[in-house]
Amino acid sequence: MTAQFIIDAAFIVATLLFIYGLKRMSSPVTARSGIVVAGVGMVVAVLVAFLYIADVNPKAEPFLKTNIILGVVALAVGLGWAWWSGKKVEMTAMPQMVALYNGMGGGAAAAIAAIELFGHKAHGNIILVMAVLGGIIGAVSLSGSLIAWGKLDGRINGTWRFPGLQAVNGLILLTILGIGAWTVYQGGAVGPELIAAFFVLSLVYGVMMAMPIGGADMPVVISLFNAFTGLAVGFEGYVIGNPALMVAGMVVGSAGTLLTLLMAKAMNRSVSNVLFSNFGASGEEGQGEIKGSMKPIDAGDAGINMRYASKVIIAPGYGLAVAQAQHKLYEFVKILQAADVEVKFAIHPVAGRMPGHMNVLLAEAGVPYDIIYDMEDINNEFKEADVAIVIGANDTVNPAARTNKSSPIYGMPILNVDQAKQAYVVKRGQGKGYSGVENELFFADNTNMVYGDAQKVMVAMIQAVKSLEGGGH
């Protein structure tokens, strides 16, 4: 059995594990095992990479030894950092971690392109085109993801816009494409200065692309850069003749692209509108005056009212993650269920700061999958609900998106919380959502505000209901 046969067989196995793992990730019930399956595929691909190095350079002993040592060191550093950061990261910081890891993937693809182009190793027009495209997309994903991480982590505040921004971005992109086209035309025989400019401008473009985007669009942006990273990895896999990288990259790229389109659709906007509009920068413009007033209610009273309801629907948002209140929330849910109250969770596609953020948060608390529903599956049930409670969500429950044509979020599909007989909104204060748009739900006649940290609110609700039933102390 030759080394090449083992390499090819291992790459096929890794590819099948990637695809099967992704398939299992499509359902919350099997997602955990899907991640493990795909992880095993990655282990296979990484380990066989060492055999690939030895087989490609069997006679270059010093070079071979150096490559293997560097590979082991890189693997140890990567594993150590990932294990440490993955164990310590809070659920609220999960979107930042995803953005950061995604950027690392794009950076790795760009590094492969840099080695090929600086070393004049890429030969043939198709290989050169793939190397150039992978280099551009990978570098843009790296710098753009770092900006997304900075925004989500609070290290970069606000947006950065100036007159003519899109024209400047267009000029930078045309310059990058021009250098790339010239590199291909010259068969890769261009000076290192030009290639360095190519990568620097690509990194700059990623920054210029991500900086103007408002915080409300970050879930879509993370998904988009994830697609970019997948495409870049796939292109560079073709360049170095690695089937596992090609398939994994294309699978991630296509899945990320579909997810980006679905999330943009969930906001009733196009991807180009997300990237090039000023949404999220000036939410109050054109919104008009909101009638009514915010009506506060004690957390205990709200909890007791839900105890005597027949049906309660919960709409979670990022505030739930910030307060780390998911465990107390589920404790309260179990109390309601024991009192024969029907309880369901309603998840908006862009709730939280990344795709699936709320699903992961609830899964961490042990909430059963069969009471968690996507927006399109539960929206018609709100009018049957005695109570709808919003915990930390804002823009995804704003009825202005359905009724107010002057609102910046008009047309965005929302959870129909306002159609419930009674709505409670758990919120720290009277601030606006991530998009900066005032929420009309807060002023509605059937809405009461429960002010306070979500975890403390849930504790108060639990104590009130237990006291009511003679079980509190």
Image (spheres, rainbow, N blue to C red):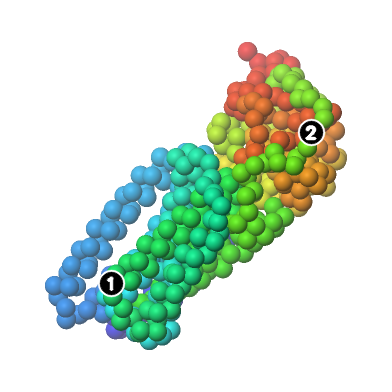
Residue under label 1: 192
Task: Say which quadrant the N terminus sits in.
Answer: bottom left
Quarter of the image for residue 180 reads bottom left
Q: Looking at the image, can residue 276 be seen?
A: yes
Residue drawn at x 51%, y 61% is 169
Name which of mark 1 and mark 2 comes first in the sequence: 1
Q: Amino acid at mark 1?
A: Pro
Quarter-wise, where is residue 44 in the image?
Answer: bottom left
Q: Is residue 414 in sight in this rendering? A: no
Tell me the residue at 71%/35% (across/down).
438
On the image, the x and y values in percent for residue 16 come to 49, 72
Horizontal arrangement in the rendering, residue 106 relative to residue 218 (left or right): left
Q: Which secondary structure lies at badge 2? A: loop
Camera-side residue of 448 and 115: 115
The residue singled out by tag 2 in the image is 289
x and y, in percent, of residue 203 in the image:
41, 60
**Which kind of residue does numbered mark 2 sit on?**
Glu
Which quarter of the figure has residue 270? bottom right
Residue furthest to the top in view is 473
Residue plotted at (14% across, 75% down) = 61
Q: What percent of the width, then of the height, locates residue 7?
A: 34, 77
Q: Secondary structure at mark 1?
A: helix
Q: From the viewer's perspective, is 306 left or right of 233?
A: right
Give the residue displayed 29% in from the left and 58% down from the top.
75
Picture layout, residue 240 above or below residue 334 = below
Q: How many labels were placed on the picture?
A: 2
Q: Residue 328: x, y in percent?
A: 60, 29
Marking on residue 455 = none
